[in-house]
Image (cartoon, coloured by chain):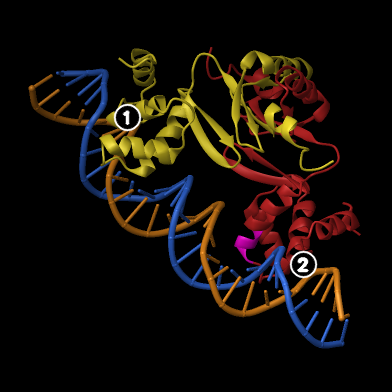
Chain colours: A red, B yellow, C blue, D orange
DNA sequence: ATCGCTGTTGCGAAAAATTGCAATAACGAG
DNA sequence: CTCGTTATTGCAATTTTTCGCAACAGCGAT
């Protein structure tokens, strides 16, 4: 039914001694249905439309839980926290500080850095998302940046 | 007196039409004195010790202001927000998710990635701090990581 | 299908972070 | 030095996020 692999996370959750609850399914659905990244507040509204009894505190607790299980990815973009389904193809975001536009870049682009850090520092980087702030192509063409 | 260049930021602030207030000086001092990265709460306590009248809301507003002026750097490490004096030598942090240990890496290590993104995407990355979560050398030697 | 253990949730309260607004004070001009 | 403009602060109220705890419910065993 849903496009993300339901059976898989359901059993993964149970195998680890956690429980599969309707709330968790609703919240995961809501994040999935939002398409891209979404906020706790948006998730709440979406879930609340279907199941008004679900509490906002549950949203916060559940996104945290789902993040630890690596079913979703948490990202902090200019102060705000967003979540999205952790696809099998990790990607990263370039956030334009002028127009706010967000574009994705492939994990392959950054994996070289992680490998280098692992070799040089013996530190195994596990971060699955970066949000890099800067100025996009469009805004660079239009005007001179703030300084210099 | 202080080791960071006071005269410089004082005039930079004034030149841009902002005002140099005792609160801003105290807060900048507090961040400087903390050595490394510090939280708004810590800044508040440090400032409050010298000037009890300063309000917590002012701390939040001021760190935001100082960040926009690039006098300090904001970093979000496992949910919490930290600030530190923006030295002329930007650096980044490797945060171990096992022992919590934080080590620094030089900007030179990551600048290659930024350059590559600029060339390939025409996106000018301006992020001055990354916090990469993973497993440090020590923890990797000690035990098998969580999974696999 | 029923029972029991214990992981989860809802709820209310607390803590953290943000905001509107009137009072204050920085600083350029005279 | 004094004045006037207006950026900034303190305060209180709001909003956002977290937490403790009793009630609830998932799920393995019977």
Residues indicated by labels 1 and 2 sit on the same polypeptide chain: no
Tell me if residue B122 comes above or below residue B26 in the rendering. Answer: above
In the image shown, does A135 or B130 lie closer to the viewer? Answer: B130
Q: In the rendering, at what x and y percent does residue B134 appear? A: 70, 33
Please, which residue is most extreme toward the front here?
B142
Q: Residue A2: in sight, yes or no?
A: no
* Label 1 Cα neighbours within 10 Å, binned few <14 / some 14-19 / many ≥20: many
The chain containing the residue under callout 1 comes to B
* Quarter of the figure with residue C2: bottom right
Q: In the rendering, at what x and y percent does residue A109 appear? A: 80, 24
Q: Which residues are magenta?
A: A55-59
**Residue D16 shown left or right of residue B21 in the figure:** right
Q: In the rendering, at what x and y percent does residue C14 appear? A: 43, 60
SS for callout 1: helix
The chain containing the residue under callout 2 comes to A
Q: Main secondary structure of the magenta part?
A: helix
* Quarter of the figure with residue B125: top right
Q: Which mark is residue A22?
A: 2
In the image shown, does D3 or C4 lie closer to the viewer? Answer: C4
**Residue B40 shown left or right of residue D22 in the figure:** left
In the image shown, does A68 or B85 lie closer to the viewer? Answer: A68
Q: CA distance from mark 1 to mark 2?
A: 50 Å
In the image shown, does B115 or B96 lie closer to the viewer? Answer: B96
Q: Are marks 1 and 2 in contact (CB under 8 Å)?
A: no
Q: Quadrant of the C terminus of chain B?
A: top right
Q: Which mark is residue B26?
A: 1
Tell me if residue C23 comes above or below residue C9 in the rendering. Answer: above
Q: Residue A11: in sight, yes or no?
A: yes
Task: Give me the residue at 62% from left, 16% from top.
Answer: B107
Q: In the rendering, at what x and y percent does residue A148 appear? A: 54, 12
Task: Give me the residue at 33% from left, 13% from top.
Answer: B7
């Amino acid at each position: 039914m849903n496009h993300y692999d339901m059976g898989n996370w359901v059993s993964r959750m149970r195998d680890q001694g956690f429980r599969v609850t309707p709330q968790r399914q609703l919240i995961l659905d809501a994040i999935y249905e939002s398409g891209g990244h979404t906020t706790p507040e948006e998730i709440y509204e979406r879930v609340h439309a279907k199941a008004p009894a679900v509490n906002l505190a549950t949203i916060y607790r559940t996104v945290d839980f789902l993040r630890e299980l690596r079913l979703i990815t948490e990202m902090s973009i200019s102060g705000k926290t967003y979540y999205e389904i952790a696809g099998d193809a990790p990607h990263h975001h370039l956030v334009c500080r002028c127009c706010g536009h967000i574009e994705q870049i492939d994990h392959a682009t950054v994996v070289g850095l992680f490998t280098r850090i692992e070799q040089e520092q013996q530190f195994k980087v596990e971060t699955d998302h970066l949000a890099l702030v800067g100025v996009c192509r469009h805004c660079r063409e239009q005007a001179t940046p703030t300084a210099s």
